[in-house]
Image (tube, rainbow, N blue to C red):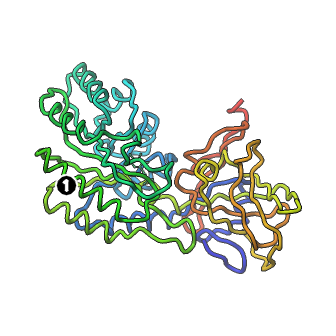
């Protein structure tokens, strides 16, 4: 995104024109940014050419996933619906891994029928269920076991997953038991050790620690894993001068790990692939003045973008047309929904705004639309993909008739 003559552009498209043509609120993605992210991600780890499985839950748009798949990425799915989305987008089943703590029998059965690469199991009961279904289909199924490495990812507590108090994965002792159990099973083939310690991780040291735990546990288990799935979680800069994850250090730690373990590395990145590709364009409906601050009431709400309400996340907010005038009032950007958590951000010294002005919220490509809902019977917004001067509608705005 850049300003040209005080007007904000995504690639070669003037954002003001998007609002006129498609109405607001609307999610706008940049193809150029997507491509850059994927190429950089691959470049960071090119010495061991990992299998990169895009975490579908971060963005479930089939047309966007099609573009991601064209770069050779696979998919990490956490439900039958997501598996169907990945297959619909043309992702090769042999590049799909299925994660999640509560896969139902029908989900496991579907995954088995689709011949995906791995089902990453998270409990003894789940392994038994996979075994039972595989047996009934007379098949041998490749599985992974998700270990909870008890590593603090040093991220928001709501999105931390790798500590022993989190519901994800199994502890070390259970892990060894399950490895031994799998060795004797006729219907499952243990191929993978998987971990995923959390999301929006900006410090490489938790990853380094996690790899040390894996190294120790694999040696102790004396088992040869064909795959080591390190999950995703790589953080992005939501603030302008935010620190960045040091990929070089992470890469070095993995290469060191691989000296002792001859396995194929799998990654499951979501946010780092799509997070900064998307912006949410919104129009100001009303401005309500108050002695302390002004409420900027937008036509986008927490149902369109849940992250601020859910995690207290903050998204950079920009005016679409720059005027150069600064407001003396504090602005609180809110949506029209009947919840006090329906607010996006509070800003001082923002550009002076008036009703009908347009603003964008940045870096909403991950966990934006995928977390959106129809709360207050609000239709989900249009999604467009911008490629140079071209605009592709990759999802139409929902119609009220469809909701009622
Ligand atoms: C959510 C999730 C991911 C993706 O996390 P990001 O932070 O978006 O990279 C990967 N693997 C698993 C198992 C997940 O639950």
Q: Can residue 117 be seen in this view?
A: no
Q: Identify the residue under disc 1.
A: 215
Q: Which residue is drawn at 30% across and 48% down?
A: 149
Q: In this view, does 4 lie above or below 373?
A: below
Placement of the C terminus among the 4 image quadrants: top right
The one nearer the camera, 340 or 45, is 340
Residue 326 x %, y %:
80, 76
Q: Dividing the image into 4 quarters, which one contains the N terminus?
A: bottom right
| Side of 283 relative to 286 (left or right) | left
The correct choice, above or below, for 90 with respect to 321 in the image is above
Quadrant housing residue 201: bottom left
Q: Provide residue 268's location: percent of width, then percent of height.
A: 36, 52
Q: How would you rate the neighbour count of disc 1 (Cα within 10 Å): few for under 14, some for 14-19, many for 20 or more?
A: some
Q: In the displayed structure, does residue 283 sit left or right of residue 388?
A: right
From this view, report whether residue 327 is shown above or below residue 88: below
Residue name at image x 29 percent, y 56 percent = 210
Report the residue that reaches farthest toward the top: 136
Q: Residue at x 72, y 32 (%)?
A: 401
């Amino acid at each position: 995104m850049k300003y040209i003559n005080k007007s904000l552009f995504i690639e070669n498209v003037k954002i003001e024109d998007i609002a006129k043509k498609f109405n607001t609120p609307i999610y706008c993605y940049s193809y150029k940014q997507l491509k850059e992210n994927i190429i950089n991600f691959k470049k960071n780890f090119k010495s061991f050419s990992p299998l990169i499985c895009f975490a579908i839950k971060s963005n479930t748009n089939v047309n966007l996933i099609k573009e991601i798949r064209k770069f050779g990425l696979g998919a990490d799915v956490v439900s039958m619906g997501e598996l169907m989305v990945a297959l619909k987008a043309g992702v090769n089943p042999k590049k799909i891994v299925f994660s999640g703590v509560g896969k139902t029998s029908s989900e496991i059965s579907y995954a088995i029928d689709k011949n995906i690469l791995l089902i990453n199991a998270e409990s003894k009961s789940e392994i038994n269920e996979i075994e039972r279904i595989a047996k009934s289909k007379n098949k041998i199924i490749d599985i992974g076991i998700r270990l909870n490495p008890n590593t603090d990812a040093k991220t928001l507590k709501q999105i931390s997953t790798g500590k022993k108090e989190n519901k994800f994965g199994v502890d070390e002792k259970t892990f060894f038991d399950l490895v031994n159990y799998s060795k004797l099973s006729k219907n499952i083939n243990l191929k993978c050790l998987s971990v995923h310690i959390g999301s929006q991780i900006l410090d490489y040291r938790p990853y380094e620690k996690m790899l040390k735990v894996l190294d120790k546990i694999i040696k102790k288990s004396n088992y040869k894993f064909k795959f080591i799935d390190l999950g995703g979680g790589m953080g992005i800069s939501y603030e302008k001068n935010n620190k960045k994850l040091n990929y070089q250090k992470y890469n070095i730690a993995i290469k060191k790990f691989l000296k002792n373990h001859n396995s194929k590395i799998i990654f499951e990145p979501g946010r780092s692939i799509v997070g900064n590709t998307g912006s949410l364009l919104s129009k100001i409906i009303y401005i309500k003045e108050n002695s302390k601050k002004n409420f900027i009431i937008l036509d986008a709400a927490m149902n369109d973008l849940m992250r601020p309400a859910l995690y207290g996340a903050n998204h950079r907010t920009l005016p679409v047309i720059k005027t150069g005038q600064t407001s003396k009032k504090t602005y609180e950007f809110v949506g029209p929904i009947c919840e006090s958590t329906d607010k996006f951000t509070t800003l001082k010294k923002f550009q002076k705004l008036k009703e009908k002005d347009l603003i964008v919220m940045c870096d909403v490509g991950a966990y934006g639309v995928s977390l959106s809902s129809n709360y207050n019977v609000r239709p989900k917004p249009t999604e467009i993909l911008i490629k140079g001067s071209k605009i592709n509608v990759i999802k139409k705005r929902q119609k009220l008739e469809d909701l009622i």
